[in-house]
Amino acid sequence: MLKVTYAREPQEAVKLCTASEGAEYKAGGTDVMDRFKQRTLMPSALINVSGMARELRYIRQSDDALTAGALTTLTELMEHPVVVERMPVLFQSTDHTATPQIRHVATVGGALCQRPRCVYLRHPDFQCRKKGGAVCYAQIGDSSTHAIFDNELCCAVHASTLGAALLALDATLEVWMPGENAARVVTMQEFFTLPEHNARVENSLPAGSFVEAVRIPLPMGVTKQAYERASPRLLADWGEVEVCAVLWLEGNRITDSRVVLGSVGRTPRRATETEARLKGQPLTRDVVVYAAQAAAAGARPLKDNQHKVTLTNNTVQATLEGLLS
Amino acid sequence: MPKVSRRDFLKGGAAAVATAPLLAGTDGHAQDTPRELAPDERVAVDLTLNGKPTTLNVLPTTTLAEALREEANLTGTKLGCGHGACGACTVDVDGRTVASCLGLCVDAHGATVTTVEGLAPDGKLHPVQQAFIDADALQCGYCTPGFVMSAVSFYDRWRKERGTAAPSEAEVRHALAGNICRCGAQPAIIQAVIAACRGVRARPPNVPSAPERNLVPRFDAVAKVTGQARYTVDRKLPGMLSGYMLRSAEAHARVKRIDVSRAEKMPGVRAVEVMLPSSDGRFVTVRWVGQELAAVAAETSWQAEAAARAIQVELEVLPPVVDFTKAEQPDAPVIFSKAQMDEVRHANEGPALPESLSTWKGNVRGPTRFPQRLVPPSVPLSNMGLGAMPSNSEGVLEAVAESAIAVDINAETAVQMHTALEPHAVIAQWEGDALTVYASCQAVQQTAGDLAGALDLPTDKVRVLAEYVGGAFGAKAMSRPEMLAAARLAKKTNAPVQMILPRWDELTVAGNRPASRQRVRMGADRKGKLTAIHHEARTYCGAAVGEAATGLTSTHYAVEELYRLDLNVVTTTPPGCPFRAPGFPPNAFSLEQAVDEVAARAGLDPLLMRIHQETNPRRAAVYRLARERFGHPERLREVARDKGRFVRGVGCATGEWFVLTAPNCTVEARATRDGRLTLSTATHDIGQGARTVLAQLVQDLLGVPPSRLTLRIADSNLPTAPFTGGSITTSSISNAAYHALRAFIDELQGAVASRVRGAVPVPGGMRFPDGKRVAWRDLFEYLPADPFVILGRRGPDADGFAIPPGPLDQIPQLPVAVTKDRVSSANIVEVEVDRLLGRVRVLSALAVLDAGTLMAPVPAASQVMGGVIQGISYALYEGRRMDPTTGRQLSRSLESYALLGIADAPRIDVVFLDKPSPRSPTGAMGLGENATVPAAAAVANAFFHATGKRVLSTPMLPSKVLAALS
């Protein structure tokens, strides 16, 4: 049984959340209610923020960006004409996230701040490092779906497909932090820069922070964008590897790129070596195959997820090949 | 106009009405201060529910699904997984489908909510509901309301934007990707939705039109598409208590003490029962995580759970044995000692012979020797799949080695979970010394007998009912500890007690198809004629025994040299139990890949190669039919050459199954002069269509339409019927009903003839002196009595049975017999392999089956599609994840245990060899098991055809695919 509190504006939500140890926000509820019902990673209290829908469920378009309130649903985001037309990587990745029933209620804020789907984390009888324990059970047990990067402390992969897409699009967040009187801007790169020696968190925000909105710059110039997911099932599955790619082109020459890998590390991460191999090159099959072979550079797979190294390279190749015209 | 909700303070018993509005819902009320709700404080939520303004009084954490089911009594909204993965709880909120199991009811304040009950408010079905019926897009029906809600949402949008254009299959798949069907109705669902959008009448895929036969639609389809079908989880009895089972968190331990005294004093708790097999002070060993320790009954489920956590259990933890290989090592802890042999459970449907007949070496059990005094010598035991007879291993290996083609294959299959969408559920209620049990169950009479035995009651004091069952697949064939717990708690509390397994328990303790490791060595001559098979199988039933994975090998090919060995390796993991065609799909996965390898090496069409050496003409006919239907058999022989990202291949595999029947199965026919007919028998409809089998027979014999027919089934007090498993049902009930209806016709004919001079029987009825032909259905007014009741019993086959053999006069009392028929099947599937992402997709599948006479073509075709879907799912996705150290199961949800989704469901072409069994009057044989036997092997063979490589391990995940291709 849970105590439930209703917050009516972000600053108040932060106050309520920080006032109570172990309290968590509930927006769409698709993650937190799941954990509550499975009796694992249970919050001590819920700060129900869905009542702020009137204020925080919006998409605003300006000359250079799209801004979505935190309570915008994934469906609303992906159906926005600017997303459909100018941000295909966001459209495709969101369209392949979870299921229609989930996308209809899951929110932008919740999708970014959801907890990982690690089978040990979501098992009530394993007191792993994320729960304050001393052991990462996946490292010594079943690590088949776990991280191949940054996996020494904890190897649960970040669950947010949206986060990967927003990192590829260089988005920023407006975040209310505890004790502050205004929302501040946090880049996706900052959001995904984890504190050292802290296995418990999946982003850099102080506990109790509230993401109010996400600002997505409209891609400038000519871009090609794609999303690809390696998963056993075609839809309604978690990715073993996800790739969000944005290429900036002049003619057929790649002037810049952001190739983001999801489901392979504790956060979505850029495949910097791949990006380097693409820069200045023509968009040809040889170039993308060569670039893709560097996608998993630096990976350190665990006992059961060796295949994710090849799969990462292959998924990047599949994504980029999809952009060859 | 903004609504202001009321809050009722139920705390402290004082009902007061406050005016502070609840900050929730879509109209976003203002409020003065943050509202904090105590966990047990009820809130009034106003919403428009199925078109009517409604107020639901709920707790702040009550989900929308719970509120709809418990407060609004709308049980058409089902709970499947409980975490948004299965879609059974799909409802429409403000024009969008949502998973109501994850949404809070308070957040629906002010919203417009539509459930499946709201689609046909005046009894007129929504076009989508009608299309589901017409296409037979459902089986057990448990997922159906959720699918219908998703489909209606898609239909509404489609009609608005595209009119009556036809949506593509891909569009429908994408829209319905949030719904899971375990029975495997996806191909029919897709066709139903397309037909509804086009505004044309849907047809069941794969049901050939039969102009001479009036095909009956699924008898209970209307109840299922409207959400009116009541499953065990939907029942609510007055004063019903919630039961909760405390389970072991350790895989291996001795229970030294269980102290329930603290739990008994917890709020709301009414009774606590220790559930160990023995509570007389002797230490009891638990052997798997999830094994039952104690059960609590309380006023709410939260109270029961909290109390269960307060039970103090003192354990002496023993080393777990989880790893299959380590379990066999000499230093592995022994899980069952000689003195504990009576604690060994059986995981299969085979006879539970005493363990003294088996060899035990540490944790390895087998082979089992069947004594001649138990089985007459005339019975070819080795043909029964009941475990191997030791024979000449070295001789067979030599024969293989000397063969022109010698194949050696090591295959592995993972543990598969039944995953019925309705979990195991039970309600027990006492009236005096009589017990009534509602259970999600496929064996009401056996369960009644088991419970009577366990509770020391006469059998006639226990009644078990299972009106609707939301999937079973074998896991609901046996009585379960939860049933006994509910009965004991209900007795103690003098109130009905309900127990429903949460999804994680359902996935953990409710049964599974055991894993296997197999080695098949096979010899053949240059022409592909198989000469020798050496098959060793280890099966891993957890803390149980009995699985055999070489049964198919024993009969499927006529070879001169055959050796097979079945060993069970015991571990401290949850016990397996019968799962659709026990042992045969894993067996086919190795055997049929070996045969495919022989064909490839011989350069032969694998199906033609089988036909050439087939000695059973019916089976050869099935294979020929498959080849003809497939159309371009030359493709089966081609070698994969394409090296692009996507490569395609076709593969085939074959299978077979027993024809079981229940000679003592009895059907009562009861007719009244007003034209109504009622058939009664204790059989079950778990989605396979037993009701429709009876309704079609009534239609065929009497011309009585379903609208005049009442079917009473799944009640242990009704005339005898077998448990529903092993494909026993149709051969049993159809023949029993046939005898009842034939006798009924004879009586009716006599009654008419005695009153109408000159009336003579003609096919389908009587001809009156004036020349008018009157069908049997229109002659009920002549019945000799009102009501008129007559019984029919299944009885023996014309030429007796394979088991038991011998005099027919003993047979009518037998609960189960193995007939001399055998059914066979062939699958051809086409796959596409994504060589980059390691993903295998089945593009299409052809299933050809011998099922004897098709008693009910509509559900028969659906059941075969379902069997193929389950087989594909087994091949590609399903594998239990278990922590290798602790034995704690990691597959606890439908995210961590993946079933095939609608996006991956292929088109399936089903063809029957519609030829009666010569042995029984209806000619029915059976098809449920046979439908799933070859599918996984066919997928694996198609993969080989596409890539030139083999994946010899299920599930064929990207990791294994990439390894095979590298």
Image (cartoon, coloured by chain):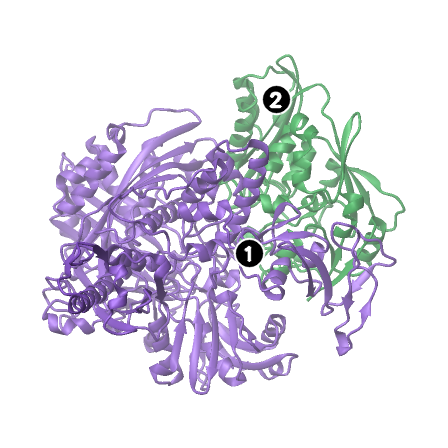
Chain colours: A green, B purple
Q: Position of residue B423 (x, y in %)?
A: 48, 62
The residue to which callout 1 is attached is: B117
The residue to which callout 2 is attached is: A277
The residue nearer to you, when weighing B625 against B273, is B625
Q: Residue at x 40, y 45 (%)?
A: B135
| Element type where label 1 sits in the image | helix
Rendering quarter of residue B513: bottom left
Q: Residue at x 45, y 58 (%)?
A: B223
Left or right: B306 with respect to B892? right
Rendering quarter of residue B786: bottom left
In the picture shown, does residue B162 fall above or below A71?
above
Residue located farthest toward the right when viewing the structure as drawn:
A181
Q: Give the residue type that dot 1 points to.
A: Glu
Q: Chain of mark 1?
A: B
The residue nearer to you, when weighing B898 against B966, is B898
In the picture shown, does residue B320 fall above or below A165?
below
Q: Position of residue B328 (x, y in %)?
A: 35, 60
Cα distance in 3D space between marks 1 and 2: 58 Å
Q: Are marks 1 and 2 in contact (CB under 8 Å)?
A: no
- Tags 1 and 2 both on a single chain: no
Quadrant assignment for the C terminus of chain B: top left
| Element type where label 2 sits in the image | helix
The residue nearer to you, when weighing B920 against B893, is B920
Q: Position of residue B428 (x, y in %)?
A: 47, 76
Q: Chain of mark 2?
A: A
The residue nearer to you, when weighing A219 against B72, is B72
Q: Give the residue type that dot 2 points to.
A: Arg
Count every numbered label the image shows and give the total: 2
| Residue B165 visible somewhere in the drawing | yes
Left or right: A171 with respect to B318? right
